[in-house]
Image (tube, coloured by chain):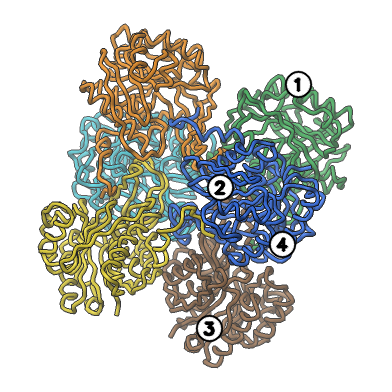
Chain colours: A yellow, B orange, C cyan, D brown, E blue, F green
Amino acid sequence: MTDLVTFGETMALFAARRTGPLRFARDFDLGFGGAESNVAIGVRRLGHTAAWLGRLGADEFGDLIWSALAGEGVDVRAVRDPDAPTGLMIKGRRTADLIDVRYYRKDSAGSRLSAADLDSGLIGSARVLHVSAITPALSASAREAVRHAIAVARSSEALVSLDVNFRRALWTPEEAGEWLRETVGDVDVLFATEAEGRLIADAEGPAELAKALAAYGPRHVLVKLGAQGALELSDGVVRRAEPYQVTEVDAVGAGDAFAAGWLADWLAGAEPEQRLSTACAAGAFAVTSQGDWESLPRRADLDLLGRPADGVQR
Amino acid sequence: MTDLVTFGETMALFAARRTGPLRFARDFDLGFGGAESNVAIGVRRLGHTAAWLGRLGADEFGDLIWSALAGEGVDVRAVRDPDAPTGLMIKGRRTADLIDVRYYRKDSAGSRLSAADLDSGLIGSARVLHVSAITPALSASAREAVRHAIAVARSSEALVSLDVNFRRALWTPEEAGEWLRETVGDVDVLFATEAEGRLIADAEGPAELAKALAAYGPRHVLVKLGAQGALELSDGVVRRAEPYQVTEVDAVGAGDAFAAGWLADWLAGAEPEQRLSTACAAGAFAVTSQGDWESLPRRADLDLLGRPADGVQR
Amino acid sequence: MTDLVTFGETMALFAARRTGPLRFARDFDLGFGGAESNVAIGVRRLGHTAAWLGRLGADEFGDLIWSALAGEGVDVRAVRDPDAPTGLMIKGRRTADLIDVRYYRKDSAGSRLSAADLDSGLIGSARVLHVSAITPALSASAREAVRHAIAVARSSEALVSLDVNFRRALWTPEEAGEWLRETVGDVDVLFATEAEGRLIADAEGPAELAKALAAYGPRHVLVKLGAQGALELSDGVVRRAEPYQVTEVDAVGAGDAFAAGWLADWLAGAEPEQRLSTACAAGAFAVTSQGDWESLPRRADLDLLGRPADGVQR
Amino acid sequence: MTDLVTFGETMALFAARRTGPLRFARDFDLGFGGAESNVAIGVRRLGHTAAWLGRLGADEFGDLIWSALAGEGVDVRAVRDPDAPTGLMIKGRRTADLIDVRYYRKDSAGSRLSAADLDSGLIGSARVLHVSAITPALSASAREAVRHAIAVARSSEALVSLDVNFRRALWTPEEAGEWLRETVGDVDVLFATEAEGRLIADAEGPAELAKALAAYGPRHVLVKLGAQGALELSDGVVRRAEPYQVTEVDAVGAGDAFAAGWLADWLAGAEPEQRLSTACAAGAFAVTSQGDWESLPRRADLDLLGRPADGVQR
Amino acid sequence: MTDLVTFGETMALFAARRTGPLRFARDFDLGFGGAESNVAIGVRRLGHTAAWLGRLGADEFGDLIWSALAGEGVDVRAVRDPDAPTGLMIKGRRTADLIDVRYYRKDSAGSRLSAADLDSGLIGSARVLHVSAITPALSASAREAVRHAIAVARSSEALVSLDVNFRRALWTPEEAGEWLRETVGDVDVLFATEAEGRLIADAEGPAELAKALAAYGPRHVLVKLGAQGALELSDGVVRRAEPYQVTEVDAVGAGDAFAAGWLADWLAGAEPEQRLSTACAAGAFAVTSQGDWESLPRRADLDLLGRPADGVQR
Amino acid sequence: MTDLVTFGETMALFAARRTGPLRFARDFDLGFGGAESNVAIGVRRLGHTAAWLGRLGADEFGDLIWSALAGEGVDVRAVRDPDAPTGLMIKGRRTADLIDVRYYRKDSAGSRLSAADLDSGLIGSARVLHVSAITPALSASAREAVRHAIAVARSSEALVSLDVNFRRALWTPEEAGEWLRETVGDVDVLFATEAEGRLIADAEGPAELAKALAAYGPRHVLVKLGAQGALELSDGVVRRAEPYQVTEVDAVGAGDAFAAGWLADWLAGAEPEQRLSTACAAGAFAVTSQGDWESLPRRADLDLLGRPADGVQR
């Protein structure tokens, strides 16, 4: 049995070292990333078991992803596709404050995910199923895989968690909104930024938005407010968390860290206030160093957020 | 016919990757830079044609500069000097906030520029001639080249633009002041910081300074105020632009971007308010990423200055 | 009018800095490459004009390729595709002696090339049309583009040059052989390795192979023999060239350099012996430094192949 | 049950990028290495299961090693020592042909290994126990751990394999010789270079040496001859393997690859000739790219040793 | 004769280039550091002579340290230990604001320092002896060396300076406090942060703390307050200095720079206000660029702290 | 008193990391080099004292050179020129086998060296004065400095050593030949390649050439034959040394190492055969790693040339 099961597309990642237009970037670091595998790593680091399902190419990038996830203690159950390559993304920093991500994922192994690739037994035995709204935008078979997994999880009374993660490169706001409205009724936890929430429902202000979203069904609605912290509506109660003051190094992965923090504390049976605070702390911590997932915190790391100013640890 | 013609010395550039004294810098990136060719690239990226004239060594650095400028769509009309090398500069960051530039340009190909190297027909057919007060400080022949080019442009009723760009390593404030006072009467547009403006005229405050400078002849006087934005005096009207709030990565090239923004909008026939705003936006954008010219904006980039805070574009 | 026109897919290139499995490579350099644009650069460096046609994404990689080709003096006439990205390749070194290239070119802008993208007037005015058998393997429209271009060139009596450049990732040997046998009758110059020649015709030994290939129509058949030099059959005469002894740094691009050397000397009206020798020298020179095209020689560089042993030039 | 169990000290590794005295090296890559974990990875890549036991510091380097080994599919059973750091090594290249390795392993976690850290049940259930003569040189408790493990393996009739791996920095030839002579009678397979074999027995030539070593008890004696290949004496039969011709990039790890190749084929039940050939091929392959273990081959990689000369795979 | 003599352990330093957990850092720069040798360099750069005594391994890292210190003009009088390696430290940046340093110094050459290694004549002829409370925590012999050196300096009426530099990795607060309370009566100048001061005496607020520390004997007590500047109690007079506003790049070495600034001005006979101001300026300057000691200022550098905002020096 | 005194121009050095045309090199390492300071370092490493005189800019590059030479134990007596920069060189690798060096030394501090900059007392007290024929080509004052130094050395009966080091960028073969023929009569030891020897005298074969050179006066003539070793004519006796077989990494500095080896053994009173052998070994060792001077051997390093083939030292 695994605490959390998740699936989706994880891709190789070329990250530019230099700030400015990508065509002048010259040096790149090879890594990888994927919203759902980030959550799996995050939950694992915070003390729970996690499994990641997906489809990887039978290539070096697939090996890289498999090894790194397994090395993080995630139970990897990926199909290796001999006919399609592992997807790729290029991450640059257009300016100091604007990260720019391009994808080479068309007909990638990951986008060819189907319900048949998913181990229903594993999903059925998990306490949490976490999905993102990236997967349904990849292909018809991937969309069906999400539908199928949610159905399995619901029948086993697992907590169903959905992070919107809207990707403009994959579908339009209208397409995303339509799918989300169809799906969110089967979801227990919904993670969204304000803009993402408005793909589903229209409301003024985060609290009203959360209520409008909860009306679709989710018992827990988490609205991420960036520099303004976050807001949670759970069982009709609104809680608001203040943001942590941190020096941002790399904003990518903050949302995944937030979801991982929340889900880890849900798994641990923490109180709602603590759970929301852990989510915010995890999200804050993740931006203080480089990497989509490398920066995800362990429990002990969360204490570093409040350290004294001299900043040298010996 | 070309919208803008400019000329001057463009040099190879070794930029240190590490902050601190240059002797500890270890790793350097090879690039190039030159105030006037920066303006040519900037105007080109903002939608107009531009030609750059100058003298380059018949060496690899000369090839590097020629290829990169031509690759940016600038019409390169450079003489290749078999007897003198392309000049060189070394750019370090003495502290987080202090960039330090050293030159190896003595007897360089660029400093041997003369009036004979300039295609008068090309200058005579341009709508704008842009020069800097670096060139007259390089050599007697280069000074004569500037005089000659301005005379040609005036006779063809081109707009004559001058950016002071005072370089302490090349001449004294007194020498610069004398040349500027002799020349500025033949100029239509003058770009200067406050300190540079005071090389020519003495006045309290930017507005008064602009008036004192305009008294020498220029129809348009632009006073760059750094973190306080900029001020323009055109046809007797003073306009002031607020600065953009950006995270600075590399301040070099901001002045060239400002000039490029202003001249591009003049070429486009924009309203004075728009023109000054574009100049400020271009200058602000140029500091948000690395490189003297790599960071110069295209029209679409200027919209990125006002993006929302999450800073991830997918 | 242009001496040589060529077209095909040119892609961004991430090259690993470390020898070994790609998943451990960590650092990559961004560049680009494409067999046909390599030939265009090579011919340009050897003193002739060249134009490259193709399709590039409306993205940073497309900008990178355009700027670099234009900077090399190649006349770039590329369509920018707003709906498809510029293709990508990843180049690693599996062992010291084995380079490994992977492609992300499916549905790329370059693979969507069609006859309508080609400027028939430009092709019709050129002295040489050079194509590779990569292009017909990209898509039906690209295959039609090759057919169309050859037809235009033949009607204007341009020299039609074809380099086989067999790519296993794109089609099978049978598919390639079929297309080649259909096409080679319309070709004046054929470049092939022995293995590539056998896709078309079966014969023992390079001389017999060349004759078998010439029987399909080409007036000039060039068989590249790697460490054994090369063999040419022109107008019934077989000539053989000895290889140059060089220290190999990067073998990619050697074949393109060979073709460029041969075509440049054909354009210059050189004697057959000289032409073949230049082709071999260009191919040899290209392997002595890094990069698919950066290493292509200028005329003066070819003299460096026979320099004395101390190897320091001051 | 696991095919092979091994244990020993695995350390973080700083590898200099530049050839020359370490004090001028400037840039280093972080990795890790250890003779026994290299063998575990090697056997795993060749298709069998493997477990690695040891002691790691409760620090980032310990995490690095754990994650990477687990990511390679090795079953990691390491004790985390809160009181001692993970050992460290520095690897430079004094000249093109001379690798120089320094250790910071005194009182490291790994050197504090004891019999109590080893899971006797796991060892007892394995088909092969592989140890090196590095471990007994680390500390008294580590020496006892080796003695204990061999005893467990013998009682369960596992194959006991020992690679001499003499380390001058840890003990003298006399100390090593004494321990080896005491131990080798309990060993089934002995791996040694000629110089290492002479620590135990004195004989002229590799065949005579192998016989002298076999007289101490091992059923299989493997004498590694570097550029002259290798020699095996098994059940009284001498077999000799010719070396593979490869371009050497990094010689470290070749011996571990050889052992892994031999043991993997023993596990697979291969014929003696095949087994020795696989050992040589694995050793040869490992030197063709960078890294102590990154370069270890998979089965399919071994075919690359005989590829044709053009060296580009697409 | 030398103005300042100091001694202690100086170690090789691997500094990670990437922010985040050390296990993902990949690239490291090799350098070195040591609190006391930092002070020696700092005092030397500010115009006085300085000698550094210590013990270094007979290895490349020892050579590196010797050459760099000698190259900075420090009189190096180090014993080379053939039996123990030069110590090592690893410096990472856990988050943007938190530097993390690990040591490999157990049984290092430096920790084996003893009184016999120190040239008493040199100490006896110096105007200042500077020590840190790192040395007594290294070993019994090192502790005795400190005691001995202080006794020699007191007998020759040199100024005895002690910087607490508490290192949690080496001893407990209680152990440190005990040694400090025993020693501080023999000290003329005491440098401490507030937290370090409280290892010795308990008091509210920095001024009260300074008085409590002065009660133990030191004529000059310097309390470093980080972002709040510093406070000095000298001969009963409390002086407070405001901090400089600088952009922090690397906080390591700031305390050493502060001590060097204060001691250099004491050597120069500066007024107390000036002396404290120089100490603060040196500390501030040292954080504006990379490196433990590379960033230490010369006199002229201190003027750069108040430069105008454009930040480009040509 | 110093064993060897030398002087000349030492320059900062930007060395490209990538093989190929310099314009594509991108990354450079900062270092420094100079034929005479290389010899000073070489002699110092081989056990003798050495002083280097010269002129350096009052800039970061001058500081870099001073610190590094002093750190190597060379007695640096350089004038710092406030009005001229330290010279610069750019070192690339055009192909695997061809190093390409460009200079920015016109009107550099080093080229402004004059007799007045030299400490005649120091020269007069040395056992060896070593000069190169680079210095007279720098300027009239530098040429006079060489003449003056040789005169001082002759009057004190120091050994006068001259290495031709012909630099095509500084003067013609005819100019060099004229100066050499005028000077060589005052020289005791002459170092030259065959091509350099022919600038002075014409003769077939190295032995005949050595005799022709000795006829001009030098008691010791050393003809460096690259891959064929070297030949010495001393007191009428011809000795020939075979080359060492080494893997070449960087050929620059080999000649300086050869001179340093010969002079160090002369200073040590070694037998002629030994002296020539040491010269060859030092030259061979210097090419086995990177850097102009970093690769110079110590006595112990020379033993590494004959190490066994496995190439791993632990």
Question: Mark 4 and mark 3, same subunit?
Answer: no
Q: Amino acid at mark 2?
A: Ala
Residue F115 in percent (x, y) is at: 76, 23
Q: Amino acid at mark 1?
A: Glu
Q: Could you say which disc has been placed on residue E179 in the image?
A: none
Which residue carries the number 2 mark? E254
Question: Mark 3 and mark 2, same subunit?
Answer: no
> In this view of the protein, which residue sits in the foreground, B67 or C120?
B67
Compute the Cα span from label 1 to label 2: 49 Å
Q: Amino acid at mark 3?
A: Leu
Chain where mark 3 sits: D
The residue tagged with tag 1: helix, strand or loop? helix
The residue tagged with tag 4: helix, strand or loop? helix
Residue B180 in percent (x, y) is at: 43, 12
Q: Could you say which disc has been placed on residue E142 in the image?
A: 4
Which residue carries the number 3 mark? D118
Closer mark to the observer between disc 1 and disc 2: 2
Instruction: Choose top left, top right, bottom left or bottom right for residue E183.
Output: bottom right
Question: Mark 1 and mark 2, same subunit?
Answer: no
Residue, x 30% and y 20% (percent of image)?
B232
Q: Residues within 10 Å of mark 3 (few under 14, many from 20)?
A: many
Instruction: Choose top left, top right, bottom left or bottom right for residue E12.
Output: bottom right
Disc with the residue nearer the chain's start (2 vs 4): 4
Residue B138 in percent (x, y) is at: 50, 17
Instruction: Choose top left, top right, bottom left or bottom right for residue F40.
Output: top right
Residue A203 in percent (x, y) is at: 12, 53
> In this view of the protein, which residue sits in the foreground, B260 or F148?
B260
Q: Could you say which disc has been placed on residue F144 in the image?
A: 1
Say whether residue A284 is left or right of residue D65.
Answer: left
